[in-house]
Image (cartoon, grey):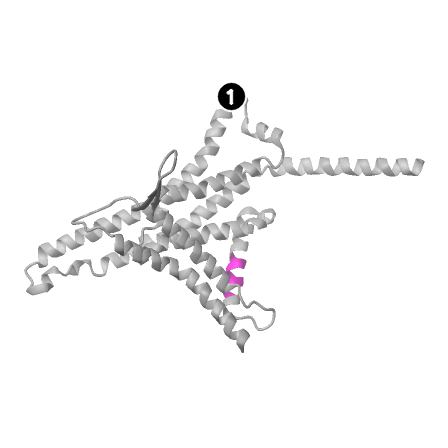
């Protein structure tokens, strides 16, 4: 009985770890929200500034919400993967297994079975992007509307692309990057650098444009409501009736649907670019030559031992 209560207590701690950071972000934003009149579209709010020797480090709302999203995904992963057993699995175990199976099928279907070890990375990238975009439903600024956050993810993708290009050796990398002729090397380098830049602006631009459009429409509806209905008696004239309903439907597209779609597209482009950077034919050829040399050495040793 005591053991059961202890496990339930750990479950509660996992849920607190998941949801408490978002609550902290909401409270922090309410306490630091400046009073503004009219339309205000600005970047991420700077909460603190850490003085550094070379350049000051600003701590922005995007950074804090991004860390809250990381803790949310981590806490939910701990909660879903606890109490796993072979017989009589729990509902949370079914959910966890379903998520892993779907992401694993997604990775194997787009990258091939050779890259099945990329499932944890793609899963983390996908859920981090999804819940970062959905955090705006809580009144927070979405980290995916900050180009610095998306650029950080894209740099990881670029590093994985370079790693895959080098798997067949440095000579093969130099040969690939200079195809079809050596004068095209600068263009190939620019093409590789353009990949993280393109996927960064694709994700960032779609999320930011949705946030800007929603803000503009909401502000316009508030002004139109005040202009038309300001003659209503008492406090009724201050209620933005025209803002009821329409922004909610827009939020379903720009915040929910668009966030899910852009997370999927970003993960899909990551998988395609990483797997496409792998020189499979050259790698298999190098592997076959290495195996042949190894077998030749073994055969030579056996021949020497037999002769002795």
SS at mark 1 in the image = helix
Q: Nearer the viewer, residue 276 or 226?
A: 226
Say which of 3 and 277 sits in front.
3
Image quadrant where one finds the N terminus: bottom right
Q: Position of residue 205 (x, y in %)?
A: 34, 43
Q: Quadrant of residue 50?
A: top left
The residue at the far top in this view is 183
Please state if 290 lies on the left or on the right of 203 as rendered: right
Residue at horizontal 35 percent and vertical 55 percent from the top: 135
Position of residue 33 in the picture relative to residue 97 (left or right): left
Q: Position of residue 254 (x, y in %)?
A: 31, 52
The image shows residue 213, relative to residue 291, as above or below, that is below
Q: At 50% across and 24% down in the image, what residue appears?
A: 184
Q: Position of residue 123 (x, y in %)?
A: 49, 53
Query: Which is nearer the eye, 283 or 308?
Result: 308
Residue 225, located in which quarter of the rendered image? bottom left
Query: Could you tell me which quadrant the C terminus lies in?
Result: top right
Residue under label 1: 183
Residue 122 sits inside the magenta stretch: no
- The image shows a total of numbered marks equal to 1
Viewer can see residue 252: no
- Residue 304: x and y in percent read 89, 35
Neighbourhood count class around disc 1 (C-alpha, 10 Å): few under 14, some 14–19, many 20 upward? few
The magenta segment = 94-102
Taking the image as drawn, is residue 246 in sight? yes
Q: Residue furthest right?
A: 308
Q: Quadrant of residue 174?
A: top right
Please name the residue shown 59% across and 69% down the image: 85
Q: Main secondary structure of the magenta part?
A: helix
């Amino acid at each position: 009985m005591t053991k059961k209560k202890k496990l339930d207590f750990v479950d509660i701690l996992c849920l607190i770890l998941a949801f408490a950071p978002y609550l902290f972000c909401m409270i922090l934003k309410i306490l630091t929200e400046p009073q503004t009149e009219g339309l205000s579209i600005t970047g991420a709010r700077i909460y603190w500034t850490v003085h550094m020797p070379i350049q000051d480090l600003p701590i922005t709302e995007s950074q804090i919400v991004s860390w809250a999203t990381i803790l949310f995904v981590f806490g939910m992963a701990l909660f879903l993967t606890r109490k796993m057993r072979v017989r009589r699995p729990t509902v949370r175990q079914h959910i966890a297994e379903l998520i892993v199976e779907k992401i694993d099928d997604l990775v194997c279907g787009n990258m091939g079975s050779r890259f099945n070890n990329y499932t944890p990375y793609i899963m983390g990238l996908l859920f981090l992007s999804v819940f970062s975009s959905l955090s705006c439903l809580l009144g927070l600024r979405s980290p995916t509307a900050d180009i610095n956050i998306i650029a950080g993810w894209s740099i990881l993708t670029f590093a994985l692309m370079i790693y895959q290009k080098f798997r067949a050796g440095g000579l093969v990398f130099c040969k690939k990057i200079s195809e079809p002729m050596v004068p095209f090397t600068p263009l190939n380098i620019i093409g590789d650098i353009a990949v993280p830049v393109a996927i960064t602006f694709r994700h960032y631009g779609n999320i930011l444009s949705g946030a800007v459009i929603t803000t503009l429409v909401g502000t316009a509806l508030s002004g139109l409501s005040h202009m038309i209905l300001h003659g209503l008696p008492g406090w009724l004239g201050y209620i933005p009736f025209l803002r009821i309903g329409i922004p909610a439907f827009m939020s379903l597209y720009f915040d929910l649907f668009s966030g899910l779609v852009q997370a999927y597209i970003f993960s899909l482009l990551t998988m395609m670019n990483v797997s496409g950077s792998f020189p499979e034919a050259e790698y298999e050829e190098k592997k076959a030559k290495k195996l042949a040399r190894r077998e030749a050495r073994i055969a030579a040793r056996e021949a020497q031992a037999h002769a002795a």
